[in-house]
Image: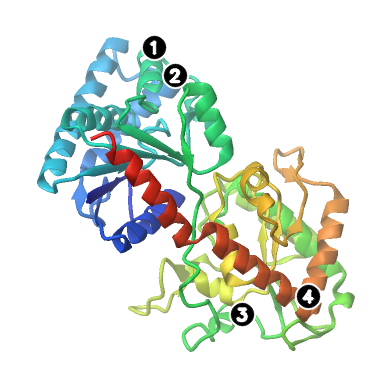
Amino acid sequence: MNIALAHFRVGETDGVSLEMEKWRKVLEEMGHQVYYISGSSTYGEIYIPELNYRHPENESFVINGYDQLNDFTDELSYKKALLAFAKRIEEKLEKAICKYEIDLLIPNNIWSLGWGLPAGIAFARAAKKLNIPCIAHHHDFYWERERYSHPTCTFVEEILMNYFPPRDEFVTHVVINKIAQAELKNRKGLNSTVVPNVFDFKQPLWEIDQYNQDFRARLGIGESDLVILQATRVAERKAIELAIELVSEVDRRRADIIGQLYDGRIFTEKSRIILLMAGLLEAEGKYIDFLKQLAAEKGVEVVWANSLIEASRTEEEKKFYSLWDAYAIADLITYPSILEGWGNQFLEGLFAKKPMVIFEYPVYQSDIKEKGFDVISLGDSYQYRENGYIQIPARRISSAASEVIRYLKDGDYRQQAVERNFSLGEKYFSYQVLKNLLDDLLSKAISFT
């Protein structure tokens, strides 16, 4: 079949784009021809400018639809402009479907997030007009975001009701976790299939090699220093303050670490414990300032490494490393997020064969914990500090620090745990699992034609 994966953007590092790459790879391995439809002009086959995540007209529809209806004389003029914009998308989408002879359309977040109201209308109308079966891949729903909870007019409420997502029989619905599955059924009366995030467990392992062997030195980190990696983007919901407090507690007990480590290295009184921040800085400046202040107060040395990290290795003008290189030099991973749609970094940690410190966010509890992974838990409840950021009981930090030290010292214990985690990840979240699920979904989708 000719299959089109559609999203507002492709080829970037957001979770939706990353999962689309995985779907594309597996679908192509299954023998299908796959195309991208997006608002990204430099990546993919089918470019529709009006789909762009930051298209100024769409941003105006978002602001006026959810914040305040200021730029239009009334609801009717807003409706007229939005429908005209949707028509532009619809016409371009129809031409692309016909030109590339698309047999199956897979919109990603287009019928769920609430950001692209015109796109939601356009895709539904084009698919219905051309009788194209669809697998609607819902990563995030509008009801999960405060931004979309107070529409400014009845027209926006009607769009969300009728198109997010549509109830047409030619649309098969996919969600990424059990919580979303239950909410979709409860709110819209729609059944869906859970397709978890997956990972390529068959690729070469991330290890120290000729390219990244100088990475520690570039970062000013010694061989005997311990590297605790925070691989996520820097955002408030990642609760990175918990990682700082954990590293502080581990460093306070450094006397228990001195001597031989799990891999034979020697940790001395002069060795450092580094919190390596590898992700993009996406938070407001005040959160980053808070993290820096907290680290200073707790005596935690933070290395901000994102300026040396790109999507892939490159040495064109300056040598850059990939995120996978950060995993390769890490001794342990922190993943204290309080909210995730699924959790790509968790899968990366499994594949990297590194011990992980986890806050048990809701989807971890509903979809992942039952698989039996060996992790260091920060618990599943938190409170807010006076400044609005996250804190957990000191006893949780203390117990996690004790487990961290065991993973850093006991090589046999560590090896058994990470190998078991890798095997469980391959069993439940591999490309083969995705292929099996896609086989069923494709059969179901094309049955409507």
Residue drawn where x is 81% and y is 60% of the image: 400
Residue under label 2? 151
Residue under label 4? 413
In this rendering, which labeled residue sits more in front, label 4 or label 2? 4
Is any atom of residue 304 visible in this view? no
Q: Earlier in the sequence, mark 1 or mark 3?
A: 1
Q: Position of residue 93 (x, y in %)?
A: 18, 38
Q: Is residue 232 above or below residue 156?
A: below
Q: Earlier in the sequence, mark 4 or mark 1?
A: 1
Distance from label 4 to label 1 (Cα)?
59 Å
Residue under label 1? 154
Q: Earlier in the sequence, mark 4 or mark 3?
A: 3
Q: Is residue 135 above or below residue 265?
A: above
- Contact flag, marks 1 and 2 (Cβ < 8 Å): yes
Q: Position of residue 25 (x, y in %)?
A: 34, 61
- Contact flag, marks 4 and 3 (Cβ < 8 Å): no
In this rendering, which labeled residue sits more in front, label 4 or label 3? 4
Q: Earlier in the sequence, mark 4 or mark 2?
A: 2
